[in-house]
């Protein structure tokens, strides 16, 4: 069984690079316990794969957030990741999403890519969601923000057993060759022949050989991808510490416990009065 991973590759005879990724188990953990409709889960899976490809492409140390916002049934979908490809994600939706296209799900909306480096300034790029797929919208983003021709293929199937998610990115390098546009079109045409079952199940070297056996392709080492939420009792208590002691007491009087549910992994943390004694002491309250 293949583990979740991303690999970069390079065409030795063309000024073109690429990335290929599978994240089946990470996708499974992102949608576990959420009961998303198929269209929502699959969009979140594509966004997860897109984020892993972006994380490797943008070459930074820190965190990246890739978020969809719209006025359609899918009001928000977000994936957070870091440079180690530790990923989490969630979505918010309403109404019936059965049979809706990508644009019908989103309505009028934007794709926001926010990069928060460990050192340096925070950066945010925004592109309108006007194409008929997430992949096409991301290709627009690269043309607008990086001036680099990019081909992206995203696959996600939340109904498969087990669930599947994978993707491919092909991107030009700063070029001087007179045949560069022709080379890129050739590589993309072959990428368009990929079937979902192939990218889900074949090893990366096998898939790239099947696509590009007439080209010289150099495949680099694997980078693991994993689900990591980061929620904890300590973080919940830190959030509750922003409330006044009297407000906490009022909530406890009404419902006997304070329950906090993580939007990402769906874990519920329950706190009774005995668990919150330190917050109920006036001396430990943070001034407002």
Image (cartoon, rainbow, N blue to C red):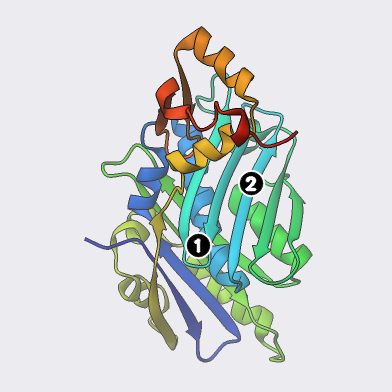
Label 1 sits on residue? 192
Label 2 sits on residue? 67
Looking at the picture, how far across and down is residue 247, in whole percent?
Answer: 63, 19
Distance between the alpha carbons at the discs numbered 2 and 1: 26 Å
In this view, 232 is above or below 192: above
In this view, 158 is above or below 191: above
The image quarter containing residue 162 is top left
Q: Is residue 189 left or right of residue 226?
A: right
Q: In the rendered image, is residue 274 in sight?
A: yes
Q: Residues within 10 Å of mark 1 (few under 14, many from 20)?
A: few
In this view, 120 is above or below 239: below
Looking at the picture, how far across and down is residue 94, in whole percent?
Answer: 58, 22
Which of the pair 153/231 is nearer the observer? 231
Which of the pair 8/257 is nearer the observer? 257
Residue at 52% x, 74% y is 18
Residue at 37% x, 32% y is 33
Q: Is residue 178 left or right of residue 238?
A: right
Residue at 48% x, 11% y is 255
């Amino acid at each position: 069984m293949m583990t979740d991973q991303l690999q970069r590759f390079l065409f030795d005879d063309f000024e073109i690079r690429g990335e290929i990724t599978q994240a089946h188990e990470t996708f499974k953990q992102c949608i576990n316990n959420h009961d998303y409709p198929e269209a929502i889960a699959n969009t979140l899976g594509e966004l997860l794969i897109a984020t892993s490809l972006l994380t490797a492409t943008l070459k930074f140390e820190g965190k990246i957030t890739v978020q969809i916002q719209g006025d359609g049934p899918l009001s928000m979908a977000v994936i957070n990741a870091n440079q180690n490809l530790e990923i989490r994600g969630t979505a918010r939706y309403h109404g019936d999403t059965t049979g809706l296209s990508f644009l019908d799900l989103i309505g009028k909306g934007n794709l926001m890519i926010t990069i928060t480096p460990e050192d340096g300034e925070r950066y945010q790029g925004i592109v309108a969601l006007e194409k008929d797929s997430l992949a096409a919208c991301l290709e627009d983003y690269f043309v607008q923000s990086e001036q680099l021709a990019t081909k992206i293929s995203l696959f996600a199937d939340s109904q498969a057993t087990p669930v599947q998610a994978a993707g491919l990115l092909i991107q030009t390098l700063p070029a001087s060759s007179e045949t560069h546009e022709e080379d890129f079109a050739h590589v993309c045409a072959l990428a368009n022949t990929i079937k979902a079952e192939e990218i889900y199940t074949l090893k990366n070297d096998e898939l790239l050989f099947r696509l590009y056996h007439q080209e010289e392709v150099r495949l680099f080492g694997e980078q693991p991808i994993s689900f990591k939420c980061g929620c904890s009792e300590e973080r919940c208590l830190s959030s509750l510490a922003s409330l006044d002691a009297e407000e906490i007491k009022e909530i406890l009087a009404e419902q006997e416990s304070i329950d906090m549910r993580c939007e990402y992994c769906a874990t519920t943390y329950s706190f009774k009065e005995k668990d919150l004694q330190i917050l109920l002491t006036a001396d430990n309250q943070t001034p407002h």
